Image (cartoon, grey):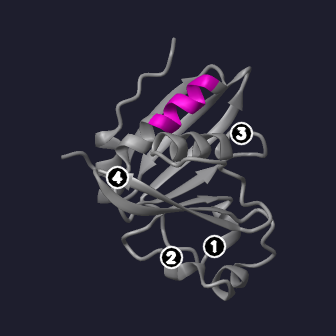
Amino acid sequence: MQRLPALLTAYLPDETATLQLGAALSRALVPGLVIYLHGDLGAGKTALTRALLQAAGHKGTVKSPTYTLSEPYRVQLDGEPVNVIHYDLYRMSSPEEFLDAGFREDFDGRNICIVEWPEKGEPVLPPPDLRVLLTVSGVGRDVELQALSHLGLLCLDRLSFAPPA
């Protein structure tokens, strides 16, 4: 068994590669997973999440929750319905807003929670199972996926992704 934290790094040469990673992640998801997405504005956090949700079977628009702070989606994982909740905490002015909105209750061990700008919710935000760091690098992006729990490790073990050369 791998030791924690386990780390996977890759270079994503273009947006297509970012979308392919999102699709691959959708096939590796497990209920209860908490994913933190780190990266500057324009690094591809929402694009990655959109690709993940669409590959998981969501039909329709996947919008950024920049103003609503959260957007819930219902998808099928291994034939079972699962809620995926996408958070964007960029506009939060304090972690108390996270608590006041009742978001902490969504982190219930069944829902998959994907959080952009998680640093805005510290220290009240539940800890991640998987940390994803996207960094603009030339015309593409560098990505790091770090498993921080056994659930995150399970996700990385299930991940089948080979970035294009």
**Residue at 66% from the left image edge and 67% from the top image edge:** 70
Closer to us: mark 4 or mark 1? Answer: 4
Count residues near mark 3 (Cα–Cα under 10 Å), then give few for <14, some for 14-19, many for 20+: some
Give the SS element for disc 1.
loop
Closer to us: mark 3 or mark 1? Answer: 3
Please indicate whether residue 3 sits to the left or right of residue 137 in the image.
Answer: left
How far is the residue under mark 3 from the one under mark 1?
21 Å
Q: Which residues are magenta?
A: 16-23
How far is the residue under mark 1 from the one under mark 2?
16 Å
Q: Which of 84 and 33 lies nearest the eye of the viewer? A: 84
Query: Can you say whether 5 is above or below 118 in the image?
Result: above
Please indicate whether residue 151 sits to the left or right of residue 45 in the image.
Answer: left
Residue 19's label in the rendered image is none
Any magenta on residue 165?
Answer: no
The residue under label 4 is: 77
The residue under label 3 is: 43
Q: Earlier in the sequence, mark 3 or mark 1?
A: 3
Query: Which amino acid does the dot numbered 3 rest on?
Result: Ala
How far is the residue under mark 4 from the one under mark 2?
18 Å
The picture places residue 88, in percent across and down from the top left corner, at 69, 61
How far is the residue under mark 4 from the one under mark 3?
27 Å
**Residue at 34% from the left image edge and 48% from the top image edge:** 155
The residue under label 2 is: 106
**Residue at 29% from the left image edge and 58% from the top image edge:** 150
The residue under label 1 is: 122
Q: Earlier in the sequence, mark 2 or mark 3?
A: 3
Any magenta on residue 19?
Answer: yes
Give the SS element for disc 4.
strand
Residue 85's image quarter? bottom right
Q: Earlier in the sequence, mark 4 or mark 1?
A: 4
